[in-house]
Amino acid sequence: MGFAADVFAQAAFDWLVGSGQKQWWSCIMQRQILALTCTLVPLLWSKLSGIAMAAELSTSINIKEPRWDQSTFMGRAKHFFTVTDPRNILLTNDQLAHAHKVISDYKQGIVSPGLTEDDLWKAKYIFDSAFHPDTGEKMILIGRMSAQVPMNMTITGCMMTFYKTTPAVLFWQWINQSFNAIVNYTNRSGDAPITVNQLGTAYVSATTGAVATALGLNALTKHISPLIGRFVPFAAVAAANCINIPLMRQRELKHGIPITDENDNRLGESSKAAQQAISQVVVSRILMAAPGMAIPPFLMNHLEKKAFLKKFPWMSAPIQVSLVGFCLVFATPLCCALFPQKSSMSVSGLEPELQEKIRANHPGVERVYFNKGL
């Protein structure tokens, strides 16, 4: 770029001298023209190069996979920090529709004019935050992973503030399990529909389990340290997750989830894969809730002894919600990253009949892959 500018400037100067026109120009004017030429040529060259680069965006970028290496925890963490970004819930329908069009076009080999690689990945993560990876349908707003932090910080903070009376326990455990039912349904694995009956069974069972656990532990902790009582909501949430998630995804356990080879060729449905997927989700959900429900109780137990909260007791809820929110900002993506989203297992771990089918039709396949859900 600098060489082209120098050559152009030298040619202009040689023309001036060689053509006998030098007498028409003062020395100052020559310098100004040559300086302007040396400035404009590189700028023009840069603009033209940028346009060419944008027009030449490769269609071979694999946007079916995340941008970062998912075989490492750090790569998965970067991916989920982007997917769970709470700012994604503020995106308009037009922005979501634009991202959907960019990604859909790109998958068909159509590159939008002026599209850069950064623009493509930005559109992909907007798309991933709002559309289900298996069904392609737009997910319910509060069921998206980007809504996890604002929704959970509010619900969890209130559960941990109002845990002493039976009506409060009933109300907030009901709110929490209603939210969990929406999240579990929204982030289910596979493209098979779930019936209203299955939804109702999972919802009622999880809510009953959470409330029973919370009320039972509250009764046991009446005569021990108040600090221990603050952990009752966490125990109830852990118990409810162990009930809610398997029940909400019971169809997957019964009929299996889609499994593919490494090239995304569908090989069948496996209940064994569903068991592994659901187990991983239960573990990550419990650990996701742990920091926000384990750290604030110690801090609140200390703060409530101070003069400020004794004078302004109504500030307990906002402070608790803020503390939970701070924990969840980090816990949500990091716990989602514990296991690969595109999980895998050995063919030998599948059902015997499915093993035979795969070995007969796809003899080179040793591992199968599946979306574990969130």
Image (tube, rainbow, N blue to C red):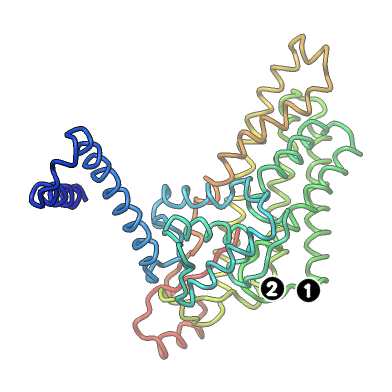
**In the image shown, does 70 or 282 lie closer to the viewer?**
70
**In the image shown, does 2 or 225 lie closer to the viewer?**
2
The residue positioned 65% from the left and 61% from the top of the image is 187
The residue positioned 68% from the left and 65% from the top of the image is 138
> In x, y percent, where is residue 307?
77, 9
Observer-side mark, 1 or 2, equals 1
Tell me which amino acid carries mark 2. Answer: Arg
Residue 143 tag number: none
Instruction: Determine the residue located farthest toward the top in the rendered image.
Output: 307
Under circle 1, the secondary element is: loop
- Give the residue at mark 1: 195
Can the viewer see residue 243 in this picture?
no
Whole-angstrom CA distance, mark 1 to mark 2, is 9 Å
> In x, y percent, where is residue 21?
14, 47
The residue positioned 23% from the left and 36% from the top of the image is 29
Under circle 2, the secondary element is: helix
Q: How many marks?
A: 2
Tell me which amino acid carries mark 1. Answer: Thr
**In the image shown, does 278 or 91 lie closer to the viewer?**
91
- Give the residue at mark 2: 251
Quadrant location of the C terminus in the rendered image:
bottom right
- Where on the picture, by quarter, is residue 165? top right
Q: Is residue 30 above or below residue 120?
A: above
User: Would residue 300 be found to the left or right of residue 48 on screen?
Assistant: right
